[in-house]
Amino acid sequence: MLPSTPPDFPPLFEEIPAAPDFSLELAARKAGHWPVAGTDEAGRGPLAGPVVAAAVILDPDNIPEGLNDSKQLSAAKRDRLFDMIMATAHVSIASSGPRLIDERNILRASLDAMRRCVLGLAVSPQMVLADGRDIPPGIPCAGRAVIKGDSRSVSIAAASIIAKVTRDRMMERAGLVYPAYGFAKHAGYGTRQHRDALIAEGPCPLHRMSFRPLKKDDPADA
């Protein structure tokens, strides 16, 4: 059974704030759930590479300025905030590779990576705020699924930055091993360059064979 939101935890705000803040974390602390971790993932959509998840417990007295949904930040700002988060917070990172994604599907593989990064934190959280509609199964504490959480919670925003920067760096390294696909430029997403390379080269071990256009519905087409 999935962990549930405690009954004394306040309902999700109707409107998304202009920038993520610490209000969900403070509400959890008021309700007796402390410390609070935020968790998020990067890389659910690409045709290649892992999905990477991060869990972050921020120091409430030393929250880096400028935290936001990683997609709203430039690469330079993400890199700067990555270093600041790593220096001031408890951080854990986990990933699920292409084979696990193909075997279990991308949602389950993402949630499993989120579960493992929560379990990997040096300090055990009493509440996990998870970006999206699902609470990772198997976490050892209460959890709350927060839709658009990286725009609401600075803890989730911090996790989104850690996950995004980590995955981008992994794909840059993958580009050195498999240079034909241009992974450093598109991080495995289905760009025109990537699709053209797939036609010319075929898939490599980093490709997700359960994703279209790699997936073959008809065995005769395989």
Image (cartoon, grey):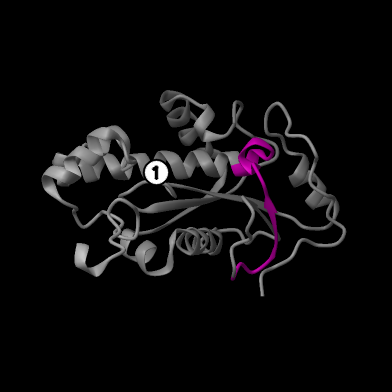
Position of residue 108 measured from the top left corner of the image (x, y, whole percent): 49, 64
**Residue 50: percent from left, percent from top:** 36, 53
180 versus 139 height, above or below: above
Q: Which residue lies furthest to the bottom in this view?
A: 1
Tell whether position 140 is magenta: yes
Question: In this view of the protein, can residue 30 be seen by the observer?
Answer: yes
Q: Name the residue under label 1.
A: 166
Q: In this view, does 108 lie above or below 66?
A: below
How many residues crowd around disc 1 within 10 Å: few (fewer than 14), some, or many (20 or more)?
A: many
Left or right for 105, reference 114: left
Q: Residue, x 19% and y 38% (percent of image)? A: 196
Asked if the stretch drawn in magenta spans residue 170, the answer is no
Q: Which amino acid does label 1 sit on?
A: Thr
Which residues fall within the magenta stretch?
138-156
The structure residue drawn at horizontal position 26% and vertical position 36%, both measured from the top left corner, is: 184
Residue in the foreground of this view, choosing between 109 and 88:
109
Q: Quadrant of the C terminus?
A: bottom left
Which of the pair 110/124 is nearer the observer?
110
- Residue 1 at x, y percent in the picture: 66, 75
